[in-house]
Amino acid sequence: MSEPKFHHYVSNFYLKGFAAEDRKKKHAIQVFDKFELKTFEKRTDKTGGAKNFNRSFSKADPNSVEKLYSYAVEEPAGAALKKVLQSKSLSSREDLERLLLFFAMTTARNPKQRSMLEAPMRQLDGLLIRSALGDDGNDILKKRNSRNLFSEEHVGMELPLIEPIFDSLCSKSWAILEAGDDAGEFVTSDFPLQIATANEDPPWGFESPGATIFVPLSKNLAILGQSGSLKASKLILDKTMVASFNFGTLVNAHRNIFFKTDDFLILDCDSSCVLDGREFFRKCIG
């Protein structure tokens, strides 16, 4: 059998929680592209990824990292997510940690993270090439600057990032957030782990003591993490709160947000009122 070449950076099992299921048990999800300002529908197994995104250094098995992510992180997280969505609780610490590891991995191996890593790497390229070749290195630099880093280069930088993000998430207290009646649904993005608030000056990080972390789990449930103890293990959100978190998801996204239908609720661009998705796209994007 041929090895899969389409590698998810937002896992299929996770996206299904925000999608509609058809008669053939296929899951279709709506995608908004922030770069091209357009909305389209795709199957969850055909979006949230790229060709050879997790290609590894191994010549014997270039999919070794993709397979490691799958059996060591995604499969346990998928089982944990299913239990959390059914129980609407975080009663199992083991299940919570499996989910947090998954979101730490999703944050580290991500197009948004890769775009932030490429600029300093290209600057280092330029410094080293000019130091070695002087003016003769200009042609090389033009070619180097015309390409993205290879997936192998990214994978090597991403793997060490997962553990410190995971440790930061585990140090926080977590609660379930549920969208209340008439509050609409949560949306998610290609960078779902987000800092919702912080009681300190930026730049913020997941390890910041004052950072409150928000993560959508499905169209109906999300989780919230913060330092110290939480007053409640579960909170029911009204439509303004759901709309506020959805706006944060859009702002925090790298390129895409994902949703079931465009009648979700979201704050408008100046945060003055609650709009549904259709109104928001028409008003703020045109």
Image: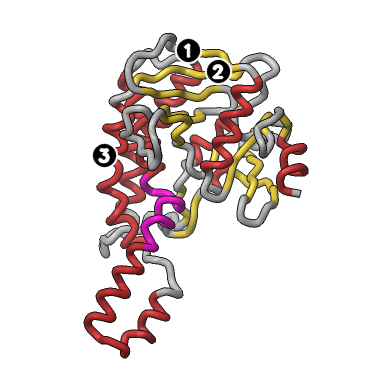
Residue type at the position of mark 3: Glu
Mark earlier in primary sequence (2, 1): 2
Say which residue label 3 marks. 163
The residue depicted at 37 percent of the width and 65 percent of the height is 150
x, y (%) of residue 210? 36, 27
Q: Residues within 10 Å of mark 1 (few under 14, many from 20)?
A: some
Is any part of residue 1 visible from this angle?
Answer: no
Q: Nearer the viewer, residue 163 or 86?
A: 163
**Magenta residues, dominant SS class:** helix
Q: Residues within 10 Å of mark 3 (few under 14, many from 20)?
A: some
Q: Is residue 129 magenta?
A: no
Judging from the image, what secondary structure is the residue with disc 2 in? strand
Is any part of residue 144 visible from this angle?
Answer: yes
Say which residue label 1 marks. 234
The CA span between labels 3 and 1 is 27 Å
Judging from the image, what secondary structure is the residue with disc 1 in? strand
Q: Quadrant of residue 226?
A: top left
The residue depicted at 53 percent of the width and 44 percent of the height is 253
Residue type at the position of mark 2: Glu
Say which residue label 2 marks. 178
Q: Quadrant of the N terminus?
A: bottom left
Magenta residues (range): 108-119
- Outermost residue on the top side: it is 231
Q: Quadrant of residue 207?
A: top left
Q: Is residue 117 magenta?
A: yes
Residue type at the position of mark 1: Lys
So how many labels did they put on this image? 3
